[in-house]
Structures are given as C-alpha cells and as structure tokens.
Image (cartoon, coloured by chain):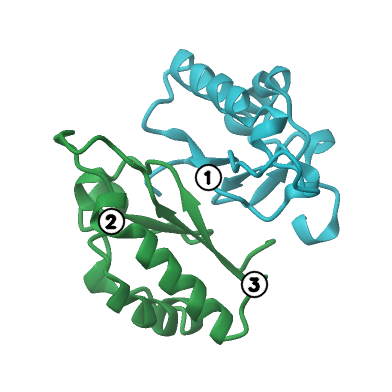
Chain colours: A green, B cyan
Amino acid sequence: MRFQHHIFVCENVRPEDDPKGCCSAKGSAEIRAAMKREIKQRGLRGVVRANQSGCLDACEFGPSMVIYPEGIWYGGVTPEDVPEIMESHIIGGQPVERLRIKNPKYQ
Amino acid sequence: MRFQHHIFVCENVRPEDDPKGCCSAKGSAEIRAAMKREIKQRGLRGVVRANQSGCLDACEFGPSMVIYPEGIWYGGVTPEDVPEIMESHIIGGQPVERLRIKNPKYQ
C-alpha cells in the first residue's frame, strides 16, 4: 500500500440554503489541518495521508471522513477529536467507536 | 464496506506555471464524469462511487486515481480508458495492469 492509512476528509461546499448542509460549513478544513499537523509531528508524512475529498455521500453525518484501506467511517468529528483518532486508530489500530457513523450501511 | 469500490480521482488545480503540473489540467474532470456515467449505466450507484479528491501526491503520474479498499493506483488515465477499468477491474476484479502506476511505492 502506498499509504498505511489514507484519510479522506470531505470538504464539499454547498450553497448556504441547501437543506443537506455541507461538511465544509461544519469545519472540515480545520479537521484536516489538525490531521496534517499530527501526521507531521509524529513523523508519519508519506506513511499516512490526510486528503481533501469531494462529497462522500454521508452529508447527514458530517463532517465526514473515511479511512482506507480499512474502510472506517467517522462522522461529527471536531478538531479536538483528531489526537484521539491518531493515537487510537492510526497508531494503535483501534478505531474510535464513539465517532464511527452508526448507520449500518457505514459499518 | 459502504462502497464495494471507492474511486478517488485527483482533481487538484495548481497555477499554470507550477512545474509539478496538476491532474485537473490533464483532464481529470472528464475522467470522473466518464466514471460516473459508467456507474450509472451499469446500475452500480450506491455500490461503486467515483469521488473527487484533492492532491493524491502522485502528480508526476497524473491524471492519477486510487481505488479502495484494494489500494490500486492508476496514472496517465484518459476518458477512453474508463470502460476498460470498469469492465476489467470493477466488474471483473482484474486491475488494468497497463494503467497501474509502475513506481514500486504505488504497487
């Protein structure tokens, strides 16, 4: 695998009056910035990548992200959650259960 | 897995004078549009997703894409290659070897 973990953070932008809302308006750029800082601080550049993505089709759970190859989906993430995701999931291999999207389709 | 295959097509945009070039200038939007048409025509919406992504850090091989969870990277793709990717890889489970990024890091 090119990256041990490839994180895609939805940064899709919709108009303000769109009933779906959008992950950008819920702060996804700050989440990705926090991810990138953690990756750099932990010496994981080139091993783990936090990638911007378009709409992941999980708008109602946003801000949304998915981590491959394991295919773990997180929703409602805040920048404050990022260290726990890094420590538990990326370093420790244990997904952060409380942040996983609970809808069965995303399990 | 939420999607049997989750395709991320780099649509990053760099300034015209950037020596790295960018996948957008190499036609990645057309590639993703072709992917989306194929997915729809084959009744695979909700099962296979062609997602826009930011820079995948494979600029020199662009237009670049990666398909998860299998982690197969393609480079130098054209819209004309899309039916073969769909038929061989997505439907048949056989990656299109001639389009894979040959650099060992991406194997």
Using a 10 Å C-alpha cutoff, classify the residue at mark 1 as few (fewer than 14 neighbours), some (14 to 19) or many (20 or more): many
Residue drawn 14% across and 35% down? A19
Q: Residue at x 45, y 72 (%)?
A: A35
Which residue is identified by label 3?
A47
Q: Which residue is mark 1?
A: B53
Left or right, B2 with reference to A23: right
Name the residue located 35 percent from the left edge and 82 percent from the top edge. A84
Q: Is residue A73 visible?
A: no
Q: Are marks 2 and 1 on the same chain?
A: no
Front disc: 3 or 2: 2
Chain of the residue that carries numbered disc 2 in the rendered image:
A
Regarding residue B20, the answer to whether it shows in the image is yes
Number of marks drawn = 3
Identity, as a three-letter code, of the amino acid under mark 1: Ser
Amino acid type, mark 2: Pro
Q: Is residue A18 shown left or right of residue A29?
A: left
Q: Which residue is mark 2?
A: A63
The residues tagged by marks 3 and 1 sit, at their Cα atoms, a distance apart of: 18 Å
Disc 3 from disc 2: Cα separation: 24 Å
Give the mark nearest the N terminus, 3 or 2. 3
Q: Residue at x 37, y 41 (%)?
A: A55
Chain ID of residue with mark 1: B
Amino acid carrying mark 3 in the image: Val
Provide residue A85's location: percent of width, then percent of height: 38, 76
**B46 sits left or right of B71 in the view:** left
Local secondary structure at mark 1: strand
Quadrant location of the C terminus of chain A in the rendered image:
bottom left
Task: Report which quarter residue B33 is drawn in.
Answer: top right
- Is residue A40 or residue B81 the one in the foreground? A40
For the residue labelled by badge 2, is the local secondary structure a helix, a strand or a loop? Answer: loop
CB under 8 Å between discs 3 and 1:
no
- The location of residue A26, given as percent across then percent down, is 24, 56
